[in-house]
Image (cartoon, rainbow, N blue to C red):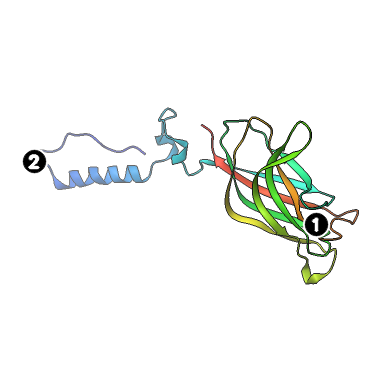
């Protein structure tokens, strides 16, 4: 949208000329469109409404374990110095929740050279596999986190999101077709 910004006015100045120019300026800066912005304008990404990127990571397990066991992990690409992801939401579904007493955590960490897991951040803890109507082996799903702000910082080593058994419960994922799938929504500032 172009507007008249010439400085030549009548002599004496007519009120309507001034009002027209102010209205043009007000309309222009209240209605800036994509074509009005130069590619070398230097606008910071943080000033844009779509300045974030989101990613959905799924972690799937088909076997349960004892307390503190890592039963599934999904690596997240990145390296030291990358912009940290923030976990905003977690949703899960389990087709074989056993006696309903089992709980799990979603954790951020890494395996060392010996294969030992080290948790860096607990993203969500003690998510209950409670089952509907206290009936054993039922399917269940729920939110594990909503509107969260847990930051996942990268390091020099590879890092992963993982499902860790918190309370073992009983008869969880014992059916041959049983599974637990956890979806984690990550968000971060777009890297310029």
User: Is residue 35 left or right of 154 when viewed as pictured?
Assistant: left
Nearer to the camera, 86 or 189: 86
Does 152 appear above or below 167? Answer: above
Q: How crowded is mark 2: few (under 14 residues within 10 Å), some or many (20 or more)?
A: few
> x, y (%) of residue 63?
85, 50
Does 13 appear above or below 94? Answer: above
Q: Residue 168 carries which label?
A: 1
Nearer to the camera, 5 or 109: 109
Earlier residue among tags 2 and 1: 2
**Splitting the image into 4 quarters, where does residue 53 fall?**
top right
Q: How crowded is mark 1: few (under 14 residues within 10 Å), some or many (20 or more)?
A: some
Number of numbered labels in the structure image: 2
Residue that mark 2 sits on: 12
> x, y (%) of residue 148?
58, 52
Task: Answer whether labels 2 and 1 touch (C-beta < 8 Å).
Answer: no
Dot 2 falls on a residue whose secondary structure is loop
Q: Quadrant of the image for the N terminus?
A: top left
User: Is residue 168 left or right of 160 when viewed as pictured?
Assistant: right
**Splitting the image into 4 quarters, where does residue 190 fall?**
top right
> x, y (%) of residue 151?
58, 44
Q: Which mark is residue 80?
A: none
- Which residue occupies 33% across, 43% down? 29
- Which residue occupies 43% across, 40% down? 47
User: Is residue 57 left or right of 169 when viewed as pictured?
Assistant: left
- Which residue occupies 90% across, 56% down? 175
**Eye-nearest disc, 2 or 1:** 1
Dot 1 falls on a residue whose secondary structure is loop
């Amino acid at each position: 949208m172009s507007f008249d910004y010439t400085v030549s006015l009548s002599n004496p100045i007519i009120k309507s000329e001034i009002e027209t120019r102010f209205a043009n300026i007000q309309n222009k800066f209240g209605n800036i469109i994509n074509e009005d912005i130069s590619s070398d304008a230097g606008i910071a990404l943080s000033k844009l409404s779509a300045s974030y990127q989101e990613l959905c990571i799924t972690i799937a397990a088909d076997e349960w374990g004892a307390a503190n066991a890592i039963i599934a992990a999904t690596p997240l690409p990145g390296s030291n110095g990358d912009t940290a992801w923030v976990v905003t939401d977690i949703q899960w579904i389990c087709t074989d929740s056993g006696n309903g007493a089992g709980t799990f955590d979603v954790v951020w960490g890494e395996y060392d050279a010996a294969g030992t897991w080290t948790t860096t951040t607990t993203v969500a803890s003690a998510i209950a596999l409670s089952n509907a109507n206290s009936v054993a082996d039922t399917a269940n799903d729920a939110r594990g986190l909503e509107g969260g702000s847990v930051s996942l910082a990268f390091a020099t080593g590879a890092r992963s999101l993982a499902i860790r058994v918190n309370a073992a419960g009983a008869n969880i994922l014992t059916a041959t077709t049983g599974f637990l799938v956890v979806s984690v929504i990550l968000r971060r500032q777009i890297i310029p």
